Amino acid sequence: MASAQAAFAAGPNAWHTHGAPARTNLCRKRPHVVQAAPGAATARKQRRVLASSCAYGAGAQGQVAIDPMDGEKALHVVFVHPQIHWNTGNIGRTCLGLGAALHLIGPLGFSLDEKQVRRAGLDYWQHVDVRVYEDWAQFANGKMKQLGGTRLFFTKFGDRCASEIEWNERGKTVLVFGSEVHGFDGIRDWLHSEGKHEIRVAFPMVDDRFRSFNLSTTASMALWDAYRHVARRGHVARALK
């Protein structure tokens, strides 16, 4: 926890200062082996990377959604007190792929320096737009109010089905998820007072034996659905470079 607090004290992007691993291009064409930087561990002296000359297919040419009012990203994912490092790494990778910002609300159950976080996010982690907050109050009273737009709180106790969500045509979309262990217990008082009008959303669960979806899976499903709608807005999208 001391590492997470230190990262916050140094600023939202403090973790960017750590040494970045060698880049890997996802294009599966003309593989070759390159040598790691001098002084690296023996296990990392050789790693397989793929040539960068191959282009993506036409279907993978996406758009990053931008709010024209302030130039801020239109899509935002919020993890409240996440406890499992690879869930955060996984959703960080997805946020990068779909052009969303990731907000992490402390206290965290792990350090962002842990290799498991970077491993789950692969070599994309250094490029993820991640913003860290000391606690919920700092986020709710600051950045969340600044973002405005539509806020959706995802929980299996929600009274709205995800398939029935009406997406706004303008502004930002903020997708909020609770802890893997305690859900929204850490902000329960806020939800019953200031947040009593917030929209609570649940994904349908069709088998009585099923308890819940994995956190990063749920967040990925929600983010894709939001992107699918938001990317249709011609006035808030720009081509990825």
Image (cartoon, rainbow, N blue to C red):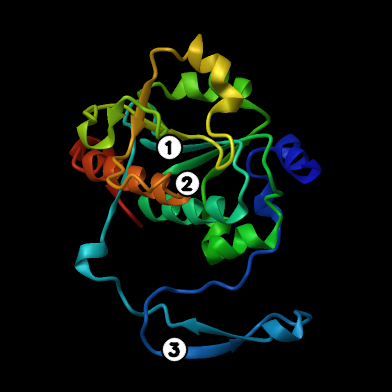
**Mark 2 in CB contact with mark 3 (< 8 angstroms):** no
Residue 54 lies, with reference to residue 232, above or below; the image says below
* Residue 5 point in image, percent of width and height: 75, 38
Residue 101 visible from this viewpoint: yes
Residue 152 in percent (x, y) is at 37, 28
Q: Is residue 100 above or below residue 42?
A: above
Q: Which mark is residue 187?
A: none
Camera-side residue of 87 and 92: 87
Residue drawn at 53 percent across, 34 percent down:
183
Depth order, front residue of 43/146: 43
- Categorize mark 2 by other alpha carbons within 10 Å: few (<14), some (14-19), many (20+): many
| Label 1 SS | strand
Instruction: Please provide percent x and percent y for residue 91.
Output: 47, 51
Quadrant of res 181: top right
Q: Which mark is residue 31?
A: 3
- At a point 43% along the width and 37% down the height, the residue shown is 76
Q: Report how far apart the C-alphas of labels 2 and 1 lie in the structure.
A: 15 Å
Name the quadrant of the N terminus.
top right
Q: Earlier in the sequence, mark 2 or mark 1?
A: 1
Mark 2–mark 3 distance (CA, rounded to whole Å) = 34 Å
Q: Which numbered disc, 1 or 3, marks the residue that appears first in the sequence?
A: 3
At horizontal 33% and vertical 44% (from top left) the residue drawn is 208
SS at badge 2: helix
**Image location of residue 21, percent across then percent down:** 63, 69
Q: Which residue is mark 1?
A: 76
Q: Which residue is mark 2?
A: 215
Q: Amino acid at mark 1?
A: His
